[in-house]
Amino acid sequence: MLIRLRQHLQRQDGVAAIEFAIVSMVFLVILFGILTYGYIYGMDQSMNHAAEEGARAAIASTSEAAAITTAHDTAYSRLHAYQPSLQSSDVVATVGDCDTSFRCITVTITYPWSSRPIIPRFVGLPTPSQIQATATIQLT
């Protein structure tokens, strides 16, 4: 009887499946976090690049209104191919004083991540409410 009890206590049927279930859940959470934050970082870099391209494109414009339109259209076209859920209203270009004697154009791109997430949300994974990029350049 004692031998049977010892054999019963030493059996490990199903232990590997339970260990796999625990480890795989942790692995999947880490993997999903890496993918989510990697995509957010990549989008932030693309938005910064698009804002800079829009500001640079506005330099050749002859008027402030043309500079705003050129900056907006350039930044939007650079990002829309990368992120189709980006809307035209997410890109804002303004002209204002950057110094006492110079005018500057500022291109701001704001993507509302909380209302339009690209990757589905994962419970408990903190993500930004919005991603924003800004570029300012002096007009001639």
Image (cartoon, rainbow, N blue to C red):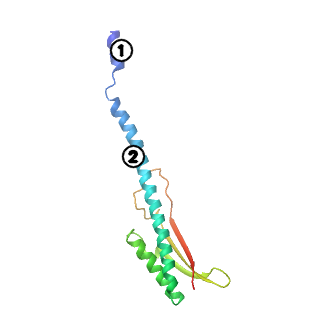
- Between marks 2 and 1, how big is the CA–CA gap? 37 Å
Up the image or down, 120 lies above or below 66; here it is: above
Q: Give the amino acid type for the residue marked by disc 2 in the picture.
A: Leu
* Residue at the extreme bottom of the image, as rendered: 62
Q: Circle 2 is placed at which residue position?
A: 28
Quarter-of-image position of residue 18: top left
State whether residue 30 is above or below residue 46: above
Q: Secondary structure at mark 2?
A: helix
Q: Specify the label residue 140 is tagged with.
A: none
> In percent of the image, x 35 and y 29: which residue is there?
15
Q: Quadrant of residue 10?
A: top left
Give the residue at x 39% y 72%.
80
Q: Is residue 100 left or right of residue 40?
A: right
Which residue lies under the disc numbered 1?
Answer: 6
Q: Position of residue 51 (x, y in %)?
A: 49, 73
The answer to whether one can see residue 122 in this image is no
Q: Secondary structure at mark 1?
A: helix
Q: Earlier in the sequence, mark 2 or mark 1?
A: 1
Q: Residue furthest right?
A: 100
Q: Amino acid at mark 1?
A: Arg
Can residue 138 be seen in the rendering of this structure?
yes
- 118 vs 140, nearest the viewer: 140
| Residue found at x 52% / y 83% | 59
Residue 118, percent from left and from top: 40, 62
Q: Quadrant of the N terminus?
A: top left
The x, y position of residue 56, in whole percent, is 50, 78
- At a point 47% along the width and 52% down the height, the residue shown is 125
Relative vertical location of residue 129 with respect to residue 25 in this rendering, above or below: below
Q: Is residue 51 or residue 125 the one in the foreground?
A: 51
- Please rate how many residues cluster around mark 1, counting C-alpha atoms within 10 Å: few if below 14, some from 14 to 19, many from 20: few
